[in-house]
């Protein structure tokens, strides 16, 4: 074999091509023996060293084959690396040298880079500038080289050089200020380049270098240079290229200090007298270098917010989020502009405008006028829940100057509740906060309309009407003190509010717990049983004469009536508990049966109809909010979600003939999402029977087959190993006799046996198992009502962006965490995962044997040490609690100081802010 390859490589071009193709087929064939691979490697290495002129043109292909041999088969890496290194040092061909560098993982010195980058070969120059990380180059030298190549005649070389400068300016400290000034003004010149991509990269360099210049200046000149940078970027907000306009607004949002007069120019239609004669160092056109007038900023943000493309409008809104807090006058103008943006056709623009308004409100700069409020309240009726949620967050922070506006705000939230009953918890929370922030208006509103809130005929205290329930929530936020009670809301309102205790406590869970809320309402409703004047007379008499008996009689009367009401409601609840219990389980089972019935429609190509039906079923399940059946609801929702993802994948990969025309990035994202969902079902649900486990394992196998069919995972042996492991689990369940195997599992077993028997190159042709997916059908599920779901809650008090925790760089910091665990036994392995940017996460083990409490509920405080404090003034850390999945066939992770198996998240990630100042 070796002799045959070598002889072909020594002859004419036709035999050379045949020899290379023969080598390629041997390398890519997994059945090729190690001895044959060794012969191929030696032949290629020898050919690389041969001074034959016929082979000089094949060096590129030989290097690629050696790289493929080293990367895919991991065979004799050291031998190949040494040969490539030797070739790199000996070759005189620039193209061959670039090919060798591309295939080599070694880091080369500065002289090699400089000797190659000035060669006339354009593609080589482009590759070297894109891969400077392969060379050890001093920052000052690299900065000079990149600056020189910004004058290259080829636009894509200028583009690459500018991108390199932008990246370099973000991570270096240059003592020579003139060098940074040179980079800045060179980038300013290129803002007028004829190529869109060059101008876009020039904007990034102007932003990065400009921030370096501002940071290096003295306090007196910082403001001037910051204004100059701001005005220069504003001049690009009207560029003809969409990408340049977006990049300009992105850069504007990074500027931290700007003069108020300059800011107001961006939302004004003419130059103000204070800035009309101002000129800054910059460039206004190709003729006027080092002179840019302040009027270049006129209408910058107005043009951005009125741009024809939604991406530009969204970018302009995002830039205003940072700038709007720099000046109260500018904030008022921004609010006026953003009120019109709330009617934008694009949901992304509306949402970004709301985020900006929320940011302004957090800093106390949001002042809504009455004409604004009409427009703003309309957004509460938006069809997108995320838009409505953000609007309610803004109302929580808004200060309303008049009773009329307060009533408008309350009525707007009530209309939101009437149109979208699913928003009840968030609407109640917003009403409570608005009442807290406007207590005078609250008392007047409740006293004016309290007559409409009375028990229905028969004395039944049930308030299903949205307006009545909202008024009771508003009353809950009223003052507490005795003296205020005499002029506050009618005390009976607090008694009525007790009937909404569960609904109100859910909406205020982050403010007050249910027990405390009940005590608060009981305390405030004291005057329901005794008039205020009599009570205060009683208190005075009690203090003066010590008449304890009268006070005790009043207290007993109050609690006797209140407990009588509670017992009556409890008796009613007990009568309906069993009926309600059975109704909820039946509802879940009926919905799951519908899932089985509609699945055959998928093979007919009705993916849109199937997906739409599945989503409507999930919405129906969302209306069942029973805490007693949390496990069944989660199981059903996750099962439907998994089938929805699987259905989309099957329609794309199995039932679609145009297989190769799909976007693999989206498919890979869907595969990972499905894998996370199935992992949650398998490990977080407690009480699953064999049938439930069987259907989860079937879904995991289907996901594994689809993962193997993803072109980016053709060599993923771990996935194939996982399929074999899951099949073993299924066979074990079937051997016990209580569960029958499915046609899908039988077909998968046949395919796997055929692959093992024929030694088929499965990893090169992963679609052999694809036919088995045509037999997949969801299994029938019947909920028993005994499932429980593992959950965790993670909180830390008193920490936010404006109030960070202190730390000392280089030393560990302790984070005090309030943790609540639901349905987690002491045998489970829990970890606290702490992630810092792109670094590897740090894990802290939670030993539940040392933590008091029972499996259903544990509440405790835990101090988690974090050891990787960076050398920075401040940083943010993301924390969450994860469960280690201990099961056969799971992938092992060694040497990371944390869990050795895959993990599932038990709660959402929380962000904690730390500062050394």
Image (cartoon, helix red, strand yellow):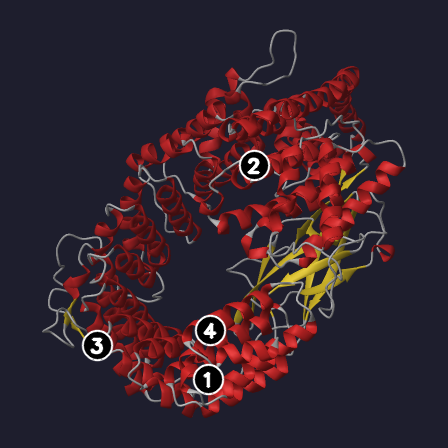
Is the residue marked by circle 1 packed among few (<14), some (14-19), or many (20+) residues within 10 Å?
A: some
Foreground label between 4 and 3: 4
Name the residue beneath numbered marker 2: 479
Instruction: Decide: is 550 above or below 21.
Output: above
Q: Depth check: give the residue in front, 209 or 96.
A: 96
Foreground label between 2 and 1: 1
Left or right: 486 as drawn, with respect to 235: right
Whether label 3 touches label 2, CB < 8 Å: no
Name the residue beneath numbered marker 1: 135
Left or right: 441 as drawn, with respect to 823: left
Helix, strand or loop at label 1? It is: loop
Q: Depth check: give the residue in front, 701 or 36.
A: 36
Name the residue beneath numbered marker 3: 153
Helix, strand or loop at label 3? It is: loop
Is the residue marked by circle 3 packed among few (<14), some (14-19), or many (20+) residues within 10 Å?
A: few
Where, by quadrant of the figure, is residue 347 drawn? top left
Q: Depth check: give the residue in front, 771 or 678.
A: 771
């Amino acid at each position: 074999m070796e002799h045959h390859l070598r002889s072909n490589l020594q002859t004419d071009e036709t035999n050379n091509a045949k020899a290379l193709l023969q080598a390629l087929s041997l390398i890519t064939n997994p059945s090729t023996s190690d001895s044959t691979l060794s012969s191929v490697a030696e032949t290629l290495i020898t050919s690389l060293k041969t001074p034959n002129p016929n082979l000089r043109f094949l060096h590129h292909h030989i290097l690629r084959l050696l790289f493929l041999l080293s990367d895919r088969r991991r065979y004799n890496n050291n031998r190949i690396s040494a040969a490539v290194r030797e070739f790199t040092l000996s070759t005189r061909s620039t193209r061959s040298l670039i090919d060798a560098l591309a295939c080599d993982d070694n880091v080369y010195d500065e002289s090699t880079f400089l000797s190659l980058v000035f060669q006339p070969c354009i593609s080589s120059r482009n590759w070297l500038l894109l891969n400077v990380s392969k060379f050890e180059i001093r920052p000052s030298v690299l900065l000079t080289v990149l600056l020189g190549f910004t004058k290259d005649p080829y636009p894509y070389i200028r583009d690459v050089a500018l991108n390199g400068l932008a990246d370099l300016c973000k991570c270096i400290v240059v003592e020579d200020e003139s060098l940074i000034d040179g980079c800045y003004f060179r980038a300013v010149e290129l803002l007028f380049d004829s190529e869109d991509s060059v101008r876009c990269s020039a904007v990034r360099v102007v932003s990065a270098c400009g921030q370096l210049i501002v940071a290096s200046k003295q306090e007196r000149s910082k403001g001037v240079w910051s204004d100059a940078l701001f005005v220069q970027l504003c001049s690009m907000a009207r560029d003809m290229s969409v990408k340049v306009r977006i990049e300009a607004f992105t850069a504007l949002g990074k500027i931290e200090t700007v003069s108020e007069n300059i800011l107001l120019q961006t939302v004004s239609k003419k130059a103000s007298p204070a800035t009309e004669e101002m000129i800054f160092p910059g460039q206004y056109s190709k003729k006027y270098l080092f002179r840019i007038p302040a009027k270049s900023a006129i209408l910058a943000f107005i043009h951005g917010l009125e741009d024809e493309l939604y991406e530009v409008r969204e970018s302009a809104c995002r830039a205003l989020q940072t700038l709007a807090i720099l000046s109260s006058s500018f904030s008022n103008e921004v609010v006026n502009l953003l009120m019109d943006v709330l009617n934008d056709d694009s949901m992304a623009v509306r949402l970004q405008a709301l985020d900006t308004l929320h940011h302004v409100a957090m800093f106390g700069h949001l002042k809504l006028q009455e004409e604004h409020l009409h427009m703003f309240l309309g957004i509460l009726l938006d069809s997108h829940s995320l838009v409505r949620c953000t609007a309610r967050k803004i109302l929580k922070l808004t200060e309303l100057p008049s009773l009329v506006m307060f009533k408008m705000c309350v009525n707007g939230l009530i209309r939101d509740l009437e149109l979208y009953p699913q928003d009840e918890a968030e609407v109640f929370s917003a009403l409570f906060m608005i009442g807290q922030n406007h207590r005078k208006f609250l008392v007047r509103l409740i006293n004016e309309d309290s007559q409409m809130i009375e028990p229905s005929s028969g004395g039944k205290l049930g308030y299903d009407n949205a307006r009545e329930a909202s008024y009771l929530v508003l009353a809950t936020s009223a003052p507490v003190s005795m003296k205020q009670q005499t002029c506050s809301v009618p005390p009976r309102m607090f008694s009525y509010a007790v009937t909404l205790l569960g609904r109100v406590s859910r909406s205020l869970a982050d403010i007050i717990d249910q027990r405390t809320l009940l005590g608060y309402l009981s305390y405030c409703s004291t005057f329901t049983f005794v008039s205020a004047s009599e009570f205060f007379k009683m208190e005075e008499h009690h203090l003066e004469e010590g008449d304890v008996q009268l006070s005790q009689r009043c207290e007993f009367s109050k609690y006797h009536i209140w407990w009588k009401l509670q017992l009556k409601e409890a008796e009613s609840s007990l009568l309906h508990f069993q009926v309600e219990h059975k109704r909820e389980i039946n509802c879940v089972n009926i919905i799951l049966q519908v899932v089985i019935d509609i699945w055959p429609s998928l093979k007919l190509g009705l993916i849109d109809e199937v997906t739409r039906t599945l989503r409507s079923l999930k919405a129906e399940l969302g209306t069942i909010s029973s805490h007693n059946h949390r496990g069944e609801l989660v199981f059903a929702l996750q099962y439907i979600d998994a089938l929805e993802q699987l259905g989309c994948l099957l329609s794309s990969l199995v039932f679609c003939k145009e297989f190769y025309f799909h976007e693999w990035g989206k498919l890979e994202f869907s595969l990972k999402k499905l894998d996370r969902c199935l992992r949650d079902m398998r490990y977080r649900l407690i009480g699953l029977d064999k049938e439930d486990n069987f259907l989860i394992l079937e879904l995991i196998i289907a996901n594994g087959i689809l993962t193997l069919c993803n072109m980016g995972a053709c060599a993923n042996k771990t996935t194939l190993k996982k399929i074999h492991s899951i099949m073993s689990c299924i066979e074990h369940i079937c051997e016990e006799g209580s569960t029958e195997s499915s046609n899908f599992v039988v077909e998968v077993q046949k395919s796997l046996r055929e692959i093992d028997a024929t030694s088929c190159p499965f990893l090169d042709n992963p679609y052999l198992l694809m036919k088995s997916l045509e037999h997949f059908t969801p299994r029938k599920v019947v909920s028993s009502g005994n499932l429980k779901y593992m959950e965790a809650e993670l909180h830390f008090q008193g920490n936010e962006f404006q109030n960070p925790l202190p730390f000392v760089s280089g030393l560990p910091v302790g984070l005090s965490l309030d943790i609540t665990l639901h349905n987690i036994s002491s045998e489970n392995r829990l970890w606290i995962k702490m992630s810092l940017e792109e670094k590897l996460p740090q894990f802290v083990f939670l030993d539940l044997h040392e933590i008091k409490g029972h499996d259903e509920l544990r509440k405790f405080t835990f101090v988690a040490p974090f050891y990787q404090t960076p050398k920075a003034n401040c940083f943010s850390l993301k924390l969450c609690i994860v469960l280690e999945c201990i099961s056969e066939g799971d992938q092992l992770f060694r040497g990371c100081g944390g869990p050795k198996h895959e993990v599932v998240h038990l709660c959402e990630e929380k962000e904690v802010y730390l500062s050394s100042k």
